[in-house]
């Protein structure tokens, strides 16, 4: 049985053929359209395993990470969420970088987490919660890794006028725990927004920052001194503008401070990096500020504005990394860029300039699509963890938390799914191959292609994957997969496979675990548009057929369609004379006839067939718009999906049935209200995926099943485009740009159990 799948390329959509936000939080990304609706009948059959990052069930659009701390293999993440991956977690969770699994810290806490610090087995957590592990613990609590229990720290933090809150925690010399936020007392001791926990009692640091709203937002520990930043304008009774230093007995300023709120601090030797909402810094005794874009360096005696810092926003996180200083927040770029890319919301200071993450040739803005609130460094992985109110890091899905590799300058996701769109799925026994635009799957590096084993529920990379790209594309992508005779054929926009040359198409041998190219590959003549393989189909008689956008195959001219004959006299590329005048995005070889679909108008409009010696139109009528998918049905039918609206009579919108014996078109139920981009069959039922939301009057959110003459929804469906479908005998696999399936987090990949309900796996 053959299945048909689809994928996006730029602003267009093509098919593939295969076998087998809290309200009021500043800096939020654009309105999140990925929201699960109310539970529907059938949602219980969606597998809840494939979740990335964190999520918040009551308000999925408002999930955020405000605090990250690293201790060895453990990465502690806190914020506004109730799930980490598919694991229930009360506002705080642990990611293990070795096992690549999320786990909860007991029952967690009952409110937002804004600060985390680790000391040995103790994880100190602060925020606006009032209970931890089900017991009272106002605004700060301690999780012990050895006993796996929560406890309060002495007497509670309190504020007479408003609820208290902890914004920052740091571990200082001698293991002292410094806590800052908005509170007047700690354990009954007057402390005024900054306090020290000795392990047995709370202590004040002088008289603290004083009055209402003089909150402490950030703390950093130096070798001997403690630095604080916040909203205050005096500390210990001394005027100090928004940033101050405690030397163990007295408070002093950093010059004359800055001109607005400080939200982030980082210490590197004698250097103190300061970030926040300020636009100017004051030298000692100066009344006129020196312009500074939300970040500056205090070197012990004077201020350095770091090439003017950022523009249009603020800095809310700072980190000393091995390759420079990382700054996160909400900003649209830097004041004096030295390269044309503009860092958005996260940037790295290398000692002389601010650089984006990553540094790529396109687009001009790189970084994240929302505010970065927390940064932490893992020496075990040479990586920076970034958390915030963000959906993506550059083009890759994050869901509020992601990992930046200092070694390979790539963003990776945290969770049990891929961190980018899935454009292709192929099934081969227990092995499910996924292709698309992603860098990780299940937390492991996986460059655009990965294997998920349904028996073990584990992810495996295919060597070093696929990389490189052609034309003005700015990242590589896989757009077609076909498994034939045990070999996995892969097409897309890439130039290398496993480090060897393989332009637009490659073959993976699962037995030898090696990649190979197909001759000299395929190529496009357009240096701007580039090339891509968009569809692959195979047969014992005709070999491997590739469709897409390219002008040559091996040494032969081949306009968007070519055949790889692997059996005689030696593996070689052959063209099909004349080809097409635009991209081929669907290929199906059946009964010695090759059917193709796409957005071409020659040799026929949108669909044509090769019958041994020439191209012919489709007898019975041509589609009036693009064809994205062609699927073999029960003889003598083909199923065809796309953007057309005039096949099969009044009900021929976007999907139709073609009788290739009698050369007639017919309807499939009421059709759909938008494009069909993927088709497959399973258990005697036809399945369609795409961008549609209804069939007739029935709601069918982007994926539906057809039997008995009508389309039925699969629960509440998915909340984004579907580009790929596959069936393995028991389950329907769905790939695309969605973030939720059946009302559950399901990042770009989902599974609908046709025979039984699947429950999330909480441990392996």
Image (tube, rainbow, N blue to C red):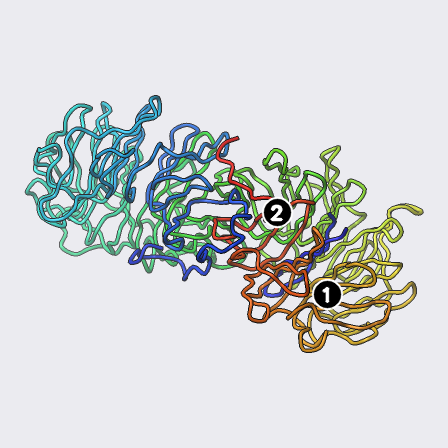
x, y percent for residue 471: 65, 59
| Secondary structure under the numbered disc 2 in the rendered image | loop
Up/down of 227 relative to 668, above or below: above
x, y percent for residue 405: 49, 39
Q: Which of the two residues, 630 or 384, is positioned nearer the viewer here?
A: 630
Up/down of 279 relative to 298, above or below: below
Residue 549 in sight here: no
Residue 745 in sight here: yes
Q: Residue at coordinates 63% horizontally, 63% vertically from top-left? A: 711
Q: CA distance from mark 1 to mark 2?
A: 27 Å
Task: Choose mark 1 or mark 2, whichever is in front.
Answer: 1
Q: Is residue 453 left or right of residue 270?
A: right
x, y percent for residue 374: 35, 44
Q: Is residue 602 left or right of residue 726?
A: right
Q: Which mark is residue 640?
A: 1
Q: Choose the circle earlier in sequence order: 1 or 2.
A: 2
Q: Is residue 267 left or right of residue 101?
A: left
Q: Look at mark 2 in the image and give the residue it sits on.
A: 448
Picture quadrant where residue 125 is located: top left
Q: Which of the two residues, 200 or 38, is positioned nearer the viewer here?
A: 38
Picture quadrant where residue 498 is located: top right
Q: Which of the two residues, 122 or 657, is positioned nearer the viewer here?
A: 657
Q: Residue at coordinates 48% horizontally, 49% vertically from top-left? A: 744
Mark 1 Cα within 10 Å, few/some/many (few <14, many 20+)?
Answer: many
| Secondary structure under the numbered disc 1 in the rendered image | strand
Q: How many marks?
A: 2
In the displayed orientation, state which residue is furthest to the front: 708
């Amino acid at each position: 049985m053959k299945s048909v799948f689809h994928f996006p390329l730029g602003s267009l959509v093509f098919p593939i053929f295969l076998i087998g936000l809290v309200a009021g939080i500043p800096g939020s990304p654009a309105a999140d359209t990925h929201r699960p609706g109310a539970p529907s009948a059938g949602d219980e059959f969606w597998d809840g395993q494939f979740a990335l990052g964190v999520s918040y069930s009551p308000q999925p659009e408002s999930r955020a990470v405000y605090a990250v701390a690293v201790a060895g293999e453990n990465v502690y993440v806190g914020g506004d969420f109730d799930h980490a991956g598919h694991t229930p977690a009360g506002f705080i969770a642990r990611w293990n970088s070795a096992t690549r699994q999320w786990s909860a810290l007991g029952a967690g806490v009952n409110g937002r987490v804004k600060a985390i610090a680790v000391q040995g087995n103790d994880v100190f957590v602060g925020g606006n919660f009032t209970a931890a592990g089900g017991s009272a613990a106002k605004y700060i609590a301690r999780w012990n890794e050895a006993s796996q229990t929560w406890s309060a720290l002495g007497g509670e933090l309190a504020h007479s006028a408003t609820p208290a809150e902890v914004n920052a925690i740091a571990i200082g010399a001698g293991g002292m725990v410094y806590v800052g936020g908005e509170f007047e007392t700690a354990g009954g001791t007057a402390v005024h927004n900054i306090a020290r926990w000795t392990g047995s009692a709370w202590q004040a640091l002088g008289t603290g920052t004083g009055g209402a709203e003089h909150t402490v937002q950030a703390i950093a520990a130096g070798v001997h001194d403690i630095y604080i930043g916040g909203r205050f304008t005096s500390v210990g009774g001394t005027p100090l503008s928004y940033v101050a230093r405690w030397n163990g007995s007295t408070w002093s300023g950093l010059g004359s401070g800055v001109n607005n709120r400080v939200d982030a601090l980082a210490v590197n030797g004698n250097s103190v990096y300061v970030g926040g909402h300020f636009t100017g810094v004051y030298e000692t005794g100066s009344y006129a500020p020196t312009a500074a874009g939300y970040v500056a360096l205090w070197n012990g005696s004077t201020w350095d504005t770091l090439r003017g810092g950022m523009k249009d926003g603020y800095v809310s996180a700072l980190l000393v990394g091995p390759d420079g200083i990382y700054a996160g927040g909400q900003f649209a770029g830097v004041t004096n860029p030295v390269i044309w890319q503009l860092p958005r919301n996260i940037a790295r200071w290398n000692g002389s300039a601010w650089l984006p993450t990553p540094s790529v040739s396109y687009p001009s803005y790189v970084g994240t699509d929302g505010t970065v609130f927390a940064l932490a460094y893992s020496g075990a992985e040479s990586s920076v963890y970034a958390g915030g109110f963000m959906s993506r890091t550059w083009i890759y899905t994050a869901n509020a938390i992601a990992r930046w590799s200092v070694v390979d300058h790539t963003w990776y996701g945290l969770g049990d799914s891929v961190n980018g769109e899935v454009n292709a799925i192929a099934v081969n026994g227990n092995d499910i191959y996924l292709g698309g635009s992603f860098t990780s799957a299940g937390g492991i590096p996986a460059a655009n292609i990965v294997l998920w084993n349904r028996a073990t529920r584990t992810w495996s990379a295919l060597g070093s994957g696929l990389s490189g790209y052609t034309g003005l594309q700015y990242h590589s992508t896989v757009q077609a997969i076909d498994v034939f005779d045990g070999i996995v054929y892969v097409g897309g926009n890439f130039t290398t496979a496993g480090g060897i040359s393989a332009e637009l198409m490659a073959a993976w041998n699962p037995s030898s675990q090696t990649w190979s190219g197909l001759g000299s590959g395929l190529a496009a003549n357009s240096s701007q548009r580039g090339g891509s393989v968009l569809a692959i189909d195979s047969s014992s008689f005709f070999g491997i057929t590739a469709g897409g956008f390219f002008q040559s195959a091996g040494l032969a001219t081949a306009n968007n369609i070519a055949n790889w004959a692997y059996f005689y006299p030696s593996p070689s590329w052959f063209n099909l004379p004349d080809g097409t005048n635009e991209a081929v995005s669907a290929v199906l070889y059946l009964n010695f006839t090759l059917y193709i679909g796409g957005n071409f108008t020659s040799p026929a409009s949108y669909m044509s067939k090769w019958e041994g010696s020439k191209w012919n139109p489709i007898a019975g009528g041509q589609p009036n718009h693009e064809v994205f998918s062609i699927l073999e049905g029960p003889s003598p039918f083909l199923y065809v999906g796309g953007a057309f609206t005039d096949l099969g009579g009044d009900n021929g919108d976007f999907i139709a049935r073609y009788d290739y014996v009698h050369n007639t078109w017919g309807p499939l139920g009421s059709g759909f209200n938008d494009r069909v981009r993927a088709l497959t069959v399973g258990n005697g039922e036809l399945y369609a995926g795409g961008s549609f939301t209804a069939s007739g009057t029935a709601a069918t959110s982007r994926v539906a099943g057809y039997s008995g003459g009508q389309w039925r929804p699969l629960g509440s469906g998915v909340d984004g485009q579907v580009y790929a479908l596959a069936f393995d005998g028991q389950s329907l696999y769905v790939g695309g740009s969605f973030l939720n399936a059946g009302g559950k987090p399901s990042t770009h990949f989902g599974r609908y159990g046709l025979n039984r309900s699947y429950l999330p796996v909480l441990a392996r």
